[in-house]
Amino acid sequence: MDIIKSKDNNKIKYVRNLNLKKFRDEENAFVAEGIKFVDEAVNEGADIKLLLVSEEVYNKNEVKNIIDFIDEKKTAVCTNQVFGSAADTVNAQGVLAVINKNTADKDDVLNNYNFIIMCDRIQDPGNLGTIVRTADAFGPAGLLLNKGCADVFSPKVVRASAGAIFRVPVIHSESDLEFMNIMKDKGFYIVSTVVDSKYSFDSMEKRDKICMVIGNEGRGVSREIINNSDMDLTIKMTGRAESLNASVAAGICIYEIRKKLLK
C-alpha cells in the first residue's frame, strides 16, 4: 500500500482546491468530511470520485467498512500531516470523500415534488445547511436557490446539512419572476415568509402544491418576490424578541406549511 507523504501530491492539491467554489463548479464535485458523513454518502449511493484516508485510522473497523464499498483505485492513504493539510476542519476524523454533485433536473423536481423551499439570498452557510437538513426532516421537499445564495456544496453547508445534502434535490434559478411563473403554471401556491404580515399560518388553507420562500438574513424576502407571491405570512410571536435566526424561522415555517399539504 503506497502512502502519500507530500502535501504537493496532485490528489492532495485537488482536494484542497475544492475549497474554492470556482473549482467545485468546474469539477462538478465537492468534499464531505468525517466518518459519519462519508458513510451516509456511501449508503445514499453518492458518486464518490476519491476517498482519502489517514494512515492513523485506516485499520479502524468503521473506516474499513467504508473502504470495502469503494473501488480500490479511488482510495488513497496519506500521512496524518498530509491529511490535515487537505481537510477543511480539524474534526475530519481522518476520512474525507470527493463526491460528484448530483445535479437535480428542474422539471423532475417540479413534477415530482409538491413542496418546494425557495431560499432568497440566504448567505450564511450554517443557515443554508440547517435549512437543507430541515427540508429533509419534514420533506419530501425540493430546494430552490436563487442568485445570491451561499454555495450549497461548500464545506460548511455540507457539514451543517448533516448528510441531508445527499437526499434533498437542489435546483437553481437565474430569474426569480420567470421561475415563479413556471411554478405557478405547474400549480404551485407561492408563500413568502415575512417579518410583519396580517396573515399567519392559521390564515392559510390546505393546498396541493406549495412553494415557500425564505428571505435573506438581514433584508428578508425581496419586494419583487413578495409582490408576485400568492400570499405572505409571518410567525406570530408572543415574546419580546423582534426576530428569529433565519434557520430557526425557516424550521418553524417549513414545519407549519408542510402541514398544509397533509390531507
Image (cartoon, rainbow, N blue to C red):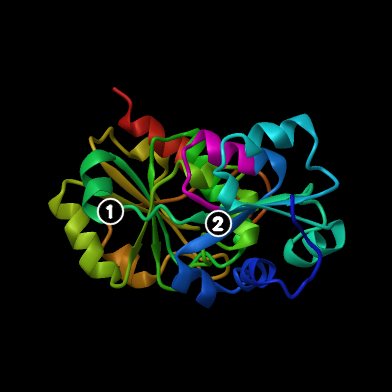
Q: Which residue sits at x=55%, y=42%?
A: 41
In the rendered structure, which disc, 2 or 1, sits on the residue that comes first in sequence? Answer: 1
Residue at the image point whose x is 40% and y is 38% from the top: 257
Name the amino acid type tagged 1: Asp
Residue holding disc 1: 105
Q: How many marks?
A: 2
Magenta highlight range: 38-49
Q: Which residue: 28% across, 47% down? A: 109
Residue 82 picture location, percent across and down: 81, 64
Separation (CA) of disc 2 from disc 1:
20 Å
The quadrant in which the C terminus is found is top left
* Camera sees residue 229: yes
Q: Read off the residue under disc 2.
A: 128
Left or right of 242? Residue 204 is left
Seen in the image, is 56 located left or right of residue 129? right
Q: Position of residue 64 (x, y in %)?
A: 71, 34
